[in-house]
Amino acid sequence: MVSDTRTQARPDRLRPLNEPLPIEVTAERDRPVSIVINCRVHLIERIQDTWIIEDEWWRQPIRRQYFALLLDDGSRRTIYHDHVTGAWRLQDY
Amino acid sequence: MPVVCLRIPYFALRIALLEEPQLDGCPLLLSNPQSGRAIVLDATPEALATGIRPGMNLREASALCPTAVILAADPVRETTVGAQVRERLEHLSPLVEPDEREQGCWYIDLKGLERHYGTSENAARRLIECADPILRARAGVAPGKFTARVAAGVARAGSIRAIAPDEAPGFLAGASIGWLPLPPDVIRQLERLGIPTLGAFTNLPARKVAARFGSTGRDAWELARGQDDRPVVPPPRTQSVSEELAMPVPAVSREMLMIGLRQIVTRAFAKPELRGKHVRQVTLHAILEGERRSWERTLTLKEPCGSRRIINALELRLQALEMTGPIETVTLEFSGIVNEVARQAAFPLMGPRAAAPLTAAIHQLKHRYGLSPIYHVVEVEPWSRIPERRHALIAYDP
């Protein structure tokens, strides 16, 4: 028999999916050149696409520039540069 | 350069002459002698001259022409010979399209080949040579596919009938209405209406034809006037792997056949071309013992399958198989080859029968951890431009 922890169950609790993860990026003139994934530096073979999102300027402004990247190992990643905080993030779009 | 139509009339019967050329000139009948109601499916002109007609009872046909040689359909041989001819044609022109409605009929576009062959007649002569002379191929050369087919239909064996663009309407006007690509009942209806030729058909106003026979009739009306700009479209190339097995003893039962098929499937999937792959379609060719007979079955799978599921599917499909004779050789042709696919199986506890144990397990986990550790994905703002706002996990708490 499992003992009751008496912690309140919260079935309505929402957990966001696909949250952006911090990532180390080397950039030249605001364009990424290499990124670090799992402690390994990957050179960026090609920037396949780039787009800007600006939203919610009336409360917490969001200004992001996304980059769809083709890495040197053939894999594809999407990262963005947060123009509000200056941080780089990894996030599938 | 125009379009060439290469045609081998009575294809199913003519291919039998490749093995038995001494039968050339004899009245030949294509029939289904194994079936309950044996009828004449096709007949050569020599047989038709004796009064035999397709659809006639085989006994009646034999009475009309006692010397007629009755042949059973051999679809495997038809496919093989057809593929051989097509391959030879493709050596001369890259644009070769087999006719969908008639076996033993191909359209060849000679565009860009002027410097190779000089005239279209020269090219057509080379194309006729692609088929064995005993098959009595003939060619029609015309600006469009339909006119080329009609021209090939009136050409004599081994000859070419060329139709210049300005001659096409006049040539088609005298041709039989039966050449139109319309269902047989529509053709019969037109004949009953007193429209025996394409000329009589084109004399009708286009809008009335369209009103009576729909868009198909309107298209046929344009073809009958020689207005045919349909391009020659070669069918897409499909990669396939074939595996053949000569049965040690002719298979007379379904069980024996399945033993052979299991062996073939296992052998085929051990080949490098199929290792780690799945297939979408399997064609079974069975050659029967002794006589020149065969049958084919095509099995199209709902989704790409590996060897085990193919064996199961074959077993299911062949359950109702009626063995028409002892099988000597079996060939399986695997096509639609794709990389091995995996399917996300349902969580075993999520099935409706498992609802009660799942609920009990979640209650137990809640007691242990304070909250249900099982979540499901819900849409929050699927239209959002911000990726993390689109979906979320919510605790699964039945």
Image: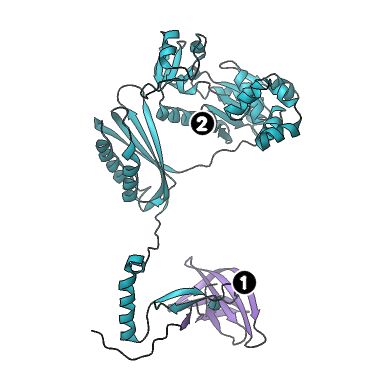
Chain colours: A purple, B cyan
Residue B390 appears in the figure = yes
User: In terms of secondary structure, where does tag 2 sit?
Assistant: helix
**Residue drawn at (69%, 33%), measured in percent from left and top?**
B212
Q: Is residue B281 above or below residue B216?
A: below
Q: Residue B3 — which label? A: none
- Work out how far the residue at label 2 is from the one at label 1, CA to CA, in angstroms: 49 Å
- What percent of the width, then of the height, locates residue B396? 41, 77
Is B101 on the left or on the right of B372, as rendered? Answer: right
User: In terms of secondary structure, where does tag 1 sit?
Assistant: strand
What subunit carries mark 1?
Answer: A
**Residue drawn at (71%, 35%), measured in percent from left and top?**
B211
**Residue drawn at (43%, 20%), measured in percent from left and top?**
B39
Is B77 on the left or on the right of B187, as rendered? Answer: left
Q: Which amino acid does the dot numbered 1 rest on?
A: Thr
Q: Say yes or no: labels 2 and 1 on the same chain.
A: no
Q: Nearer the viewer, residue B246 or A2?
A: A2
**Would you identify the image quadrant in which residue B373 lies?**
bottom left
Asked if marks 2 and 1 touch (Cβ < 8 Å), the reply is no
Q: Which amino acid does the dot numbered 2 rest on?
A: Arg
Count of marks placed on residues = 2
> Which residue matches tag 2?
B86
Q: Nearer the viewer, residue A11 or B229?
A: A11
- What percent of the width, then of the height, locates residue B325? 30, 27
**Would you identify the image quadrant in which residue B201 lies?**
top right
Could you tell me which quadrant the N terminus of chain B lies in? top right
> Which residue matches tag 1?
A50
